[in-house]
Image: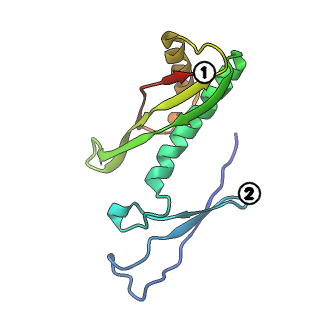
Amino acid sequence: MSEHHASICWNRQSESFAYAEYNRNHSWIFPNGSEIPASATTQFLGDPGRVDPEEAFVAAISSCHMLTFLAICARKRITVNSYRDDAVGYMKENGHGKLSITRVTLNPHIAFDGDPPDPDQMERLHHLSHEACFIANSVNTEIRVIDQYLSN
């Protein structure tokens, strides 16, 4: 078992607390001292210069998948030189009529040292990564891996 902490800090900056007027800007503060400026997504009047919770959710899924993929490759002695993922989350109404990130598509671009795994091996590595990913195991969102670009 482990615990993971985050503090969220928001202060009203507007005179009015009307929906269209109050600020959405806030900070995410982590035990190591890292602070991330956050806001609502722009469709809910947030600041486009800050990270929104939906983007952070997509990033958390992508990051966990990558870290799991790297661990599996290291254990199998498959050397990865770089990994970049252009992940996309899709929000729509779920089966209960609530807005939800219903799907996240991962688009990893991976460079290996030497010959890359063949397509069947890549599919298996991503499947194992998905199965072992802590975040994927914590959500109902459909997660797909597509368009793996392999290079040396």
Residue ID for mark 1:
152
Residue density around tag 1, few if under 14, some if 14–19, many if 20 or more, within 10 Å: few
Q: Residue furthest bottom?
A: 15
Q: Residue at x 72, y 58 (%)?
A: 31
What percent of the width, then of the height, locates residue 26?
Answer: 53, 69
Image point (54%, 12%), residue name: 121
33 or 86, which is in the foreground? 86
What amino acid type should be assigned to the residue bearing mark 2?
Asn
Q: Nearer the viewer, mark 1 or mark 2?
A: 1
Cα–Cα gap, marks 1 and 2: 35 Å
Residue most toward the right? 32
In the image, 128: left or right of 114? left
Local secondary structure at mark 1: loop
Residue at horizontal 52%, vertical 30%? 109
The amino acid pointed to by label 1 is Asn
Residue 25 in percent (x, y) is at 49, 70
Q: Classify 52 as above or below 134.
A: below
Circle nearer the N terminus (1, 2): 2
Picture quarter with the C terminus: top right
Displayed quadrant of residue 46: bottom left
Q: Which residue is mark 2?
A: 32
